[in-house]
Image (cartoon, coloured by chain):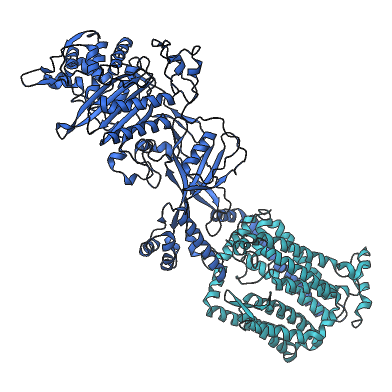
Amino acid sequence: MAGKPDATRGPQDHLLLYATLGLVLLGLTTVFTSSTVMAMAQFQDPYYFVKRQLLYAMGGLVLLYGASRIPYQRWKPLVYPILLLSLISLILVFVPGIGAKVRGAARWLKLGPLTLQPSEFAKLAMVIFLAYSLARKQEKMKYFAIGFLPHMLVAGVFIALIFKEPDFGTAVTLALITLTMLLVGGTRVTYIFFASLAGLVLGTLAVLRDPKKFARILSFLDPWKHGQDVGYQLKQSLLAIGSGGLLGVGPGQSRAKLFYLPDAHTDFILAIYSEEWGLVGVVLLLALFTLVAVRGLRLSLRAPDAFGSYLALGLTLIITLQAAINMGVVTGILPTKGLSLPFLSYGGSNLLTNLLAVGILLNISGQVKQPAAAVGRLTATPAPVAASGERLT
Amino acid sequence: MSYFLNKWVRLRLVLVGVFLAGLGLLVTGRFLHLQVLQGGALREEAEAYLRKMTPVLPERGLILDRHGAELAVSTRVYSAVAHPRQLKNPQRLARELAPVLGLDVKELQELLTSEQPFVWLKRHLTPEREAAFRAWQERVQERAQKKGAAGRQEEDAIYLLPESKRFYPQQTLAGPILGFCNIDGVGLEGLEYQFDRELYGKPKKVQRLMDARGRIVVTEEKAFDPEVRGHNLVLTIDRTIQYIVEKELAKGVAKWNAAGGYAMVMRPQTGEILAMAQLPTMDPNQPGRYPEVARKNRNLTEALEPGSAFKIFVVASALDAGLVKPSDRYHCENGIWYLTAKERIRDVHPYGGLTVQQIIQKSSNIGSAKIANRLGPARLDDYLRAFGFGSRTGIPFPGETPGLVKNHSRIRSPLDRATTAFGQGISVSVLQLTTALAALGNDGVLMRPLLVKEIVTAQGEKVREFPPYPVRRVLSSQAARQILAMMQTVTEPGGTAAGMAPPGFTAAGKTGTAQKVVGRAFSHSKFNSVFVGLVPAEQPVLAITVIIDESKGAIYGGVVAAPIFREIATQVLRVLGYHPPTPNLPVLAGAKKTPEPPAGRQNGGVTPASVLAIPELLPEVVVPAAAPSPKPGEPLRVMPDVRGLTIRQVLDLLHQAGVRCQLEGSGLAVEQDPAPGAELTPGAVCSVKFRSPL
């Protein structure tokens, strides 16, 4: 059955699709409302960001559709080329001329009119690689030299490169995704524990060496004390969220976007969103992400093969774990670091990566063995069966 | 059910789910905490950032003439200001900004590095400098964008602050009356000083939505904020009459190569001052360029000796007291009257016997001294004080002089006692003189002089009114009529100012030539040439005083001052719509009834027809067909195109149209709102921007 995907193909997970589309729409709306003032000031065009985000979203939906039509098993032979390509792009970031440096961070690649953020795609590459490798090794995962070391080496290089950019947030996210997948894949908990410990020590050392990051940590602990300098962003974020209250100040009415909150349309877009929509909107957003998490993990349990399971897990983590960390950062639970909120934050690479991930998830969902699934589901679900893959068009 | 995953893997997958759910709950809890529990407090704090109390500088009220023509207005100008403590590179900024603002680099550096939290860099920028500054701001922003820097720039701590600047569109017209303000819009002189509190307005603070760069986001700023606008001052001055008086006075001063001059026109029935002129005068737009003497309103602040013009008050008093009759004869000692061995009074021309009327007509010093003696020192004192001499009139104006009246009962010297009769040894202000003169023309009732008619809010509601106020009856009706008749002979053949009545009208006048006091003695070369007059003599509608200071060539009031009076009276009568009655028709000389003040703007106090001519017989006279003053006309229906006009032209045009105008900048009009041709509603407010032509 693993070799014949089409034979067992059922309907794809439309709940996941709707949740995704809902998130994309919320994202477009919020990018629009949060960026107009900034866009007007910088580019004399209030629609500058939202126009681009719309293009990315359309491109991302095409990717999503394509990925949902390609049997996910086809990614298997591409694992190493993808990994290599991702590695090269991560290195190219540091090459002057191709890599674009913005505010001291070399995170972007300039390819003609396109600006790509390789670290976003690196997450995808790493997940595909790990899913492939974990599925292949299965029972041998508990051995240090087979189950732990190779993955940690590959992931370590990626993480180190991303850390060097510096993109602290993405590096940590990638590390967390890797460790989680390894943990689920069967690596001994002790290895994970020591790896985490090592990572923590390294991270602490890096933080202590770099006064700027140290200051950021400090600001997270007490944003009010540092509200005029390093804690400014977090303080403004909290003020914005608080201003939202239960029902929000209304779409487009955000005050924090008037240059008070830096990165209002990117990393801290959630602050603007929650200011405008209030707790009600936040609950809606959390529900959508929860839906993605539930459907993704459910898929991971039901995928037709181990590769599919691990892939589903990794892809779900890319979206939900990052979302959770971003929310933690924006609300001051976690230290401030650059990390976008999937689907909502302005940024092409992020949106494309996440939509591509959902596309792959959708394809996996289409291959879930029907009879077995039907038992677990509600009984009255004949309607989606007929539509099958064409649902996406 | 997948068969290939062992149960441990499945368990761990579920654990991942649990972990994510935990994160989700944590975040939800945090949001609940932030938005609901702390929501109010956070919102308040955020509001404090956003809504800063920004002062709205008050806008000084207008000063208007009696018909609403703007004499003093406020325009919007911008000042460059900075918060030096927020600057990181004051040196660089100083170098950049010095040429922009036209300041010295060192000077600017000092300002930008000062310890003050706020400094003025340059007040009241010219439109060019303002444009240059805005261009600089744009360059800074471009530069910041190139660097990719977001958020607050240090350059944001230097910005433009709108201020209101006083502008006097009529320039020197009524300058010393209006006074002037300092750069902060605080009145320093004249009416600007006297009514500073009323004009200044109420500065208020409003909450404005500010972005993080300190700019006002939503411009709630109204072009016309009545709340901060000061009250408008409506004067009794008539701009047209003021112009005529100033023009004629200037002509006379130039003709006689005089040091200066004074002129005042008053309504006898109400005490309203229609015009008050002086030379040297000043342009309140540039008070610093004029000497003190030009800045002071000397019609009120200077006490002068009135000379022979003062005789009328002495004679009128004697008439009122019933001590003399117009036909009583006095011996005028053939020119020299020895009071004692050393003290004597001289007449210019020697006269023998003169009637009281002739004493006025010929202006005999000896005759009037004898009448004063007849009156006696105590009664003379009482009458002079009743006329208002020696005390302030109470006109709301800073620095009014009470003048000087000696206590005649205590004076031993008969000469010193007698000189008052011909206006020596007594000093009065032009205002006192004119007010007392007006009392003669107002049936003997002294009115309080009025310079301010009313104070109204920016919306036009009356705050305070200054209605005509009769102070006291000084003379009986009969005495007033008698003195007017005597004074009329002055302008008739044989008088000292023969032929000086305005053509077609009669005039009751009196000349005077006062030796100026230089040091402690009377000068023999410096004189004040005085003429006081009421027109028409039978029922005066105007009281006019003209004084020429140190005329060269001729000195006599009848020669120097009277022609100026004649010119002023002629033109003012025409402006007010009084036309000479046709000689064949009877003039209502005896019309006692003071007609109710008509509402028309042409006729300030008295309807000309009812006084001077019989309307039924003289319809063509009544209609002021060719009134020279601009008629208010019908309010315009549509907005005229004012672009390219000067501020003054715009104000004239819009005033005629009945449109209140908000001005900004200076120079020629470049922008207007509403656009030309737009429909106007009555009482509409328009805004016009000016730029000086390059």
Q: In this view, does A225 lie to the left or right of A121?
A: left
Task: Give the side of residue B466 with respect to residue B370, left or right.
Answer: right
> Which quadrant of the rendered structure holds the N terminus of chain A?
bottom right
**Which residue occupies the foreground of this view, A32 or B16?**
A32
In front of the other: A22 or A304: A22
Q: In this view, does B365 lie to the left or right of B648?
A: left
Residue at image location 75% in from the left, 66% down from the top: A289
Identity of the residue drawn at 38% across and 64% down: B105
The image shows a total of numbered marks equal to 0
Position of B403 with respect to B16 (left or right) is left
Residue A297 in view of the camera: no
Residue A342: x and y, percent?
A: 71, 69
In the image, residue B197 above or below residue A15: above
B485 in relation to A22, above or below: above
Quarter occupied by residue A231: bottom right
Residue A105 visible, this orientation: yes
Q: Colour of chain A?
A: cyan
Q: Residue A220 or A102: which is nearer the viewer?
A: A102
Residue reaching furthest to the left = B341
At 53% from the left and 72% from the top, the residue drawn is A215
Quadrant in the rendering for residue B397: top left
> Which residue lies most toward the bottom here?
A145
State whether residue A114 is above or below residue B344.
below
Q: Position of residue B513 (x, y in %)?
A: 22, 26
Foreground: B496 or A237?
B496
Residue B499, position as x, y percentages in the image: 31, 20
Estimate the x, y position of residue A393 in percent, counting from the top left: 86, 67
Rendered shade, chain B: blue
